[in-house]
Image (cartoon, grey):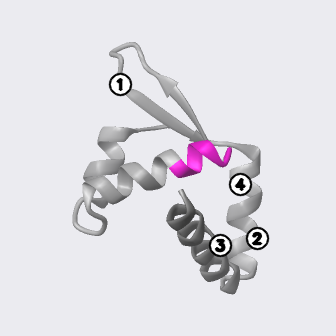
Amino acid sequence: MLSIHQLLILLEDKIPKDSLVLAVESLVKKGFLEQYTDEHGDFTFAVTESGNRMSQLLEENPELFYEQLMEDLEEEDNE
C-alpha cells in the first residue's frame, strides 16, 4: 500500500499535486484503487484486482490509454 504522502513525494516533479489528487480520486471512483485510512488518519491506497487487470491490459495495448484518457476528459467536460 502507498500513502497519499508517498505518492506525492514519488511524483512531485512529474505531476502537479492537484492533478495527482484528482487522478487518485478518479481511480478510486472507478474501482482501480481501494482507499483505506491508516492508524495516523492518513489515506493509503492499494491496487484492486480490477486495477491489476486494467494495468495488464494497458501494458499489452498501450493505445487504449489514450482512448480512456479521452473518455475521462469528455466525462469531466459533461459534469
Q: What type is the residue that disc 2 sits on?
A: Leu
Looking at this view, is 70 or 64 the one in front?
Answer: 70
Check disc 4: other Cα within 10 Å, few if <14, some if 14-19, many if 20+: few
Numbered range of the magenta stretch: 26-31
Return the mark for residue 42.
1
Residue 17 sits in quarter:
bottom left
How far, Cα to Cα, is label 4 from label 3? 16 Å
How far, Cα to Cα, is label 2 from label 1? 30 Å
Label whose residue precedes the other's in the sequence (2 or 4): 4
Check disc 2: other Cα within 10 Å, few if <14, some if 14-19, many if 20+: few
Looking at this view, is 56 or 76 the one in front?
Answer: 76
Check disc 3: other Cα within 10 Å, few if <14, some if 14-19, many if 20+: few
Residue 58 in the image: state x and y as whole percent: 69, 73
| Disc 3 element | helix
Residue 57 sits in quarter:
bottom right
Q: Residue at x 33, y 44 (%)?
A: 6
Label whose residue precedes the other's in the sequence (1 or 4): 1
Label whose residue precedes the other's in the sequence (4 or 3): 4
Along the horizontal axis of the image, is 10 left or right of 27?
left
Residue at numbered disc 2 = 57
Q: Residue at x 68, y 64 (%)?
A: 55
How far, Cα to Cα, is label 1 from label 4? 23 Å
How far, Cα to Cα, is label 2 from label 4? 9 Å
Residue at numbered disc 4 = 52
